[in-house]
Image: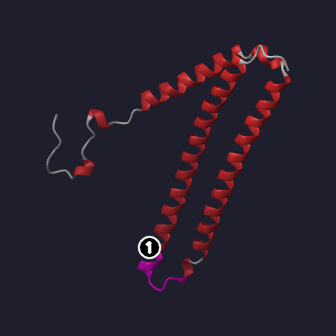
Amino acid sequence: MTHADPALPQAAQLPTPHQRPRHGQLLGNLASRQQHNLGASLAMLPALAHTNTWLSLAQLQAASLQKLIAQQDSWLAQWQGWLHTACQLGQANTVSKLLEQEMNLALRAVQIIGQQAVDLASLQENLEINYGYWASLQTAGSSAPD
């Protein structure tokens, strides 16, 4: 079957080749970034003799930790809001309202979990990019004295 069935709703039709997810390309980018970071790390070995390298690495790690803590604070606030809503489920006066509230609560939990996964993936990508840039700077400046 080369054409979508006109009887199917638009959302049920298969995506065209240019609309399909680019999983392979995204995974290739990830592998390329990791390979670059490995090379940068190996090239940076002479710079490890300098105190400034270790100080700037500590700063990079501290900034990463601050970002993770901010994400966790946001997640905690979202889960507290979810729990507050969950505690109010018994206030429905009909079965249909109770079911609606329960479904909304379940969907909100899925949304929070999904956002947490996206946030963590984004943080990982940012860390990989920042580390690669940092390592490149250290390699370029490895000949500089302390």
Pick the residue in front: 73 or 95. 73
- Near-viewer residue (82 or 94): 82
Of residues 27 and 98, which is closer to you in this image? Answer: 27
Q: Percent from the top left, x then y, of residue 58? A: 79, 34
Query: How many marks on residues?
Result: 1
The residue positioned 71% from the left and 50% from the top of the image is 69
Disc 1 is placed on an element classified as: helix
Q: What's the amino acid at mark 1?
A: Glu
Residue 100 image point, x, y percent: 44, 73
* Residue found at x 72% / y 46%: 66
> Would residue 98 be found to the left or right of residue 119 on screen?
left
Coordinates of residue 29 in the picture (x, y in percent) = 50, 26
Seen in the picture, residue 114 relative to 42 is either above or below; the reply is below
Mark 1 highlights which residue? Answer: 100
User: In this view of the protein, which residue sits in the foreground, 37 or 59?
Assistant: 59
Q: Is residue 17 above or below residue 9?
A: above
Q: If the image is split into quadrants, where does the N terminus sit?
A: top left
Looking at the rendering, in which quadrant would you find the C terminus?
A: top right
Tell me how the rendering is colored: secondary structure
Where residue 127 sits: x, y (%)?
64, 35
Which residues are the magenta region?
A: 91-100
